[in-house]
Amino acid sequence: MFVVSNDEFQILIGEALGELPGEHARNIKNVAILYEEEPTPSQRQKAKLRAHQTLLGLYEGVPLSQRQGMTRILPDTITLFKQPLEALATNSTELKEQIKHTLWHEIAHYYGLNHDQIRALE
């Protein structure tokens, strides 16, 4: 487990976001990228997690593929969960890679991909 301060975690999020390849990462709009220490019970329930499972990130919103012309909607959110991400890393480089991978995964949900489609792309 590699633990960083909240400020360092925010810096790693910014760096990871800047390193994501392609226009899809650069063209997300109306999406707040947040972080929390752990998922809430409601978020765990929404993700249908069992007691032993963890959650690294969560996209909440209306995917682009389902908006059908909607123009006035609240911002979508991508929440990264700091403690579970730290638990997977032994150094700063690994933590940033975990953050980058999680961001990519959640951005894919923003574009409307489901878990099977994301796994196929990975």
Image (cartoon, grey):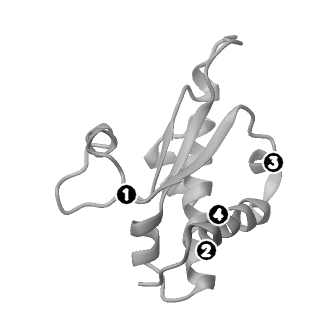
Q: In which image quadrant can residue 43 be found?
A: top left
In three-dimensional space, the C-alpha distance between marks 4 and 3, rounded to whole angstroms, equals 18 Å
Residue at the spot of label 2: 97
In three-dimensional space, the C-alpha distance between marks 2 and 4, rounded to whole angstroms, equals 14 Å
Please provide percent x and percent y for residue 114. Answer: 48, 41
Question: Mark 4 and mark 1 in contact (Cβ < 8 Å)?
Answer: no
Check the picture and name the quadrant holding the N terminus: bottom left
Instruction: Give the answer, above or below, for where 60 lies relative to 34.
Output: above
At a point 61% along the width and 74% down the height, the residue shown is 97
Which badge, 4 or 3, is on the more N-terminal residue?
4
In three-dimensional space, the C-alpha distance between marks 2 and 1, rounded to whole angstroms, equals 19 Å
Q: Residues within 10 Å of mark 2 (few under 14, many from 20)?
A: some
Instruction: Give the answer, above or below, for where 59 lies relative to 10.
Output: above
Which badge, 2 or 1, is on the more N-terminal residue?
1
Q: Which mark is residue 10?
A: 4
Residue at the spot of label 3: 26
